[in-house]
Image (spheres, grey):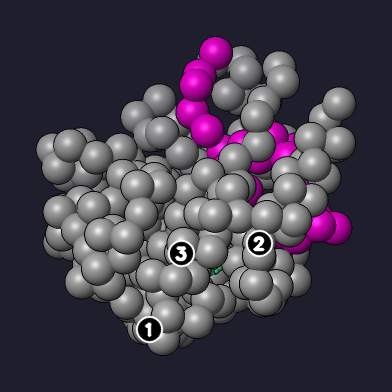
Amino acid sequence: MSRVPEISASILNADFGRLAEEVARAEDGGVDSVHLDVMDGHFVDNLTFGPVVVESVRRHTALPFHSHLMISNPLALASRFADAGSDLIVFHVEADDDVDAVIAAIERSGKRPGIALNPPTPAEAVLPYLDRVDLVLVMTVNPGWGGQPFIAEMLPKLRALDAERDRRGSSVRIGVDGGVNLETIGAAHDAGGDVLVTGSALYSTPGDLAPTVAALRAAAHAATT
Ligand code: DX5
Ligand code: ZN
């Protein structure tokens, strides 16, 4: 089945002092969505931002917002990220709250749920929820920081989820997050990744991002044609 790669800009490595401009730079560069890495300093060893930042950036672009919640208590906070303007709210299967309850809370907020899994977590952990979410986000780095190397050992997990998706005839999208760049995006897309999150590979480029986005998209396409 041919799949269209979606390039999603992770703003974690952008200049936070000029966040609206940095999002505009990605939008002008032709990305398909914005990936917002929310970290609580507990689920992961880093602390980034909350709904107030999502709401502020929301006023500057119409691009779809994917809020990636690396937090221990998504049940309590999901609706606030919905109100702030997220379109897709992705939480971790390893978080403390009941997964079905978090999915239901996101659905009640009128937004779309997604579920993420860390490198040590097997694909089986998310299979019970595959038909209830829009996106399964496979972490290809241990979450917490941008600029880390891609963990190629995650490719079999992507293939397993892709095969299960085909077996079920499911329309769930598969996301790949961490270390996605010109060298790794082809393998990530070929293994089943549709939503390809890229941070440092994008924001390490000064100025116009269009050539970088075009090169990333071409490298993904080249791997499956
Ligand atoms: C890491 C985040 C990723 C990260 C991606 O915990 O979830 O979204 O920002 O950045 P790169 O592409 O630099 O690995
Ligand atoms: Zn992320």
- Disc 3 on helix, strand or loop? helix
Q: Range of the magenta residues?
A: 169-196
Indicate the amino acid at tag 2: Leu
Which residue is identified by label 2?
209
Which residue is identified by label 1?
47
For the point 68% across and 44% down, which residue is it? 157
- Residue 181: within the magenta? yes
> Which one is earlier in the sequence, the residue at label 1 or at label 2?
1
- Image quarter (top left, top right, bottom left or bottom right) of the C terminus: top right
Indicate the amino acid at tag 1: Leu
Gap between marks 1 and 2, in whole Å?
27 Å
Along the line of sight, which residue is nearer the eye, 67 or 22? 22
Indicate the amino acid at tag 3: Val
> Which one is earlier in the sequence, the residue at label 2 or at label 3?
3
Gap between marks 2 and 3, in whole Å?
11 Å
For the point 53% across and 70% down, which residue is it? 143
